[in-house]
Image: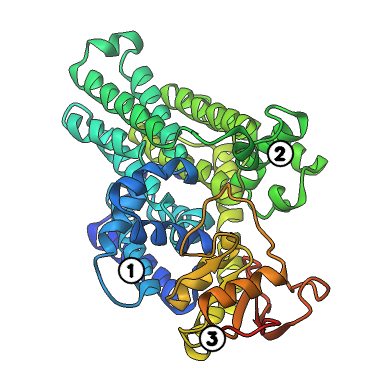
Amino acid sequence: MKLPNPTGGYFPAWLRLALFLLCWAAAAWLKFGYHELWKDEWQAWLMARDMGWGELLGALYYEGHPALWYLYLKAWTLFAGNEAWTIQIAHFLLLGLAGGLFWYFTRLRWWLSALLWLGYFPFFEYGIVNRGYILVMILGIALSGWLERPERNHWLLAIGLFLLCQTEVYGVLLASALTVYLFFRHGKWGAFKIGWFRLALCGWLVGVLVFLLSVFPRASGDELAHAFVGQPFGWEVLAKSFQGNWANAFLIGSIPDTNAFGVQPAGLLLSILVMVAMAWLFRKANALAWAFWAFQIAFFLFSALLYTGGVRHWGMILVAWIIFLQLWAIDKPKWGWTEWLILGSVVFFQVRYTALAIDREVRFPYSNAAAAGAYIQKEIPAAIPIVAINKFEATPVLGYAGRPFYALPDGEPFTYFKWVEKVYMPPEEELGLFAAYKRVNMLVVGSPKPLDPQRYPNAKLIRAFDGPNLKMENYYLYSLLPAFKAD
């Protein structure tokens, strides 16, 4: 049976434009019609809004993300209006840029391109959720197009590799893999004799250096213990990283989320099968095979040594794989039934999970933060202080409420958190003292969990926002009348 080549057939400009607009319109319907922002989406915005330039750049090591996304959001903070909508619009425009580049540069058949773009990670995880991972997609896709004629695009390659390193650590890994691809495709050691290769190499090296200067951890050992892998290269960490990087990334939904449900024998076996399938798929790709395995090994080492991550991190592997397919199409490969079986399996699970994600997003809130914030805006006067029990969990609520909350023991207002901060549970007496200090006779206390009635006997539940939601972000608002009145 004769199977179609992945790059065969004419792909007219009108069809590219039509498919791009359809995908972008579908994302707009879901994004603006149903999506609520959760804490990770609000955190970057609130930091960009409320920090000065120097403070923002100096705090990136706490976040573990380089500067590009924060600088982009910083520009958008100049616009007044509904902040949640501003975040969505800022991200949506980047999604349009990513989609436009994808459909412009794609060398794959139109139906294959559509299925890849509608996969869970490009369409939902990085297209609907407002995070900086969209920048990895934009620059990775752009580089895949520029790499077709590197001698003409030498400055674009150098700048693109530099900027890719300022997106995420996964952008650094992808930029490194693309540099490996250039090295093997253009003569190995002989590549150093090519001027444009040396320029691209400099862009990558400077990008890695700036990334390290931005996010290299400078916190104490105790703080780092909360943020990174506790036992690097321990058997459990190795197994979790392996299963997440293969089965969860390529065949999402085939096994339960490794981050939530742990490692399973079936998951490890499936991961081995996926790894063998990818080895077979790229067996004749030469330079691309070196790049693919360099990326996979580096990703695995990072997961096992520093941060195991979760589904939204492992999805960067799938994005890189799509970019590698784009590069492979330059050579117009001929695929047999095994290659199409591998590709079809990945596409099936990705698109299936997209359908599940859309169904869940339509039926359930992504987070209860929007409802809690709207209630605070409408029902709780600005003169009544709101004390957050957990700054980490309270961030999306105060974002939607449009007002800062307070945290003890310092009693200072806040709008964003630090990932390594410890949660402080103030006793009720301390809350009373804070009310007296603020000269109010009532406080509102916000908590991500029901308060212990033994610890807070005078706290009365105002409203619980604990209905089903995808990120399991629940909120409870309590009124507290201190035992003594303020003067």
Judging depth in this view, the residue of 124 and 78 nearest the camera is: 78
- Judged left or right of residue 122, residue 271 is right
Classify mark 1: helix, strand or loop: helix
State which tag comes first along the sequence, 3 or 2.
2
Judge the density around disc 3: few (<14), some (14-19), many (≥20) Cα neighbours within 10 Å. some
* Image point (56%, 77%), residue name: 362
Q: On residue 464, which mark appears?
A: none
State which tag comes first along the sequence, 3 or 1.
1
Residue 253's quadrant in the figure?
Answer: bottom right
Q: Nearer the viewer, mark 3 or mark 2?
A: 3
Residue 224's quadrant in the figure?
Answer: top right
**Amino acid type of the residue tagged 1 in the rendering:** Ile
* Image point (24%, 30%), residue name: 158
Looking at the picture, does residue 346 appear above or below residue 202?
below
Q: Nearer the viewer, mark 3 or mark 1?
A: 3
Q: Residue 387: x, y in percent?
A: 58, 72
User: What residue is pinned by disc 1?
Assistant: 89
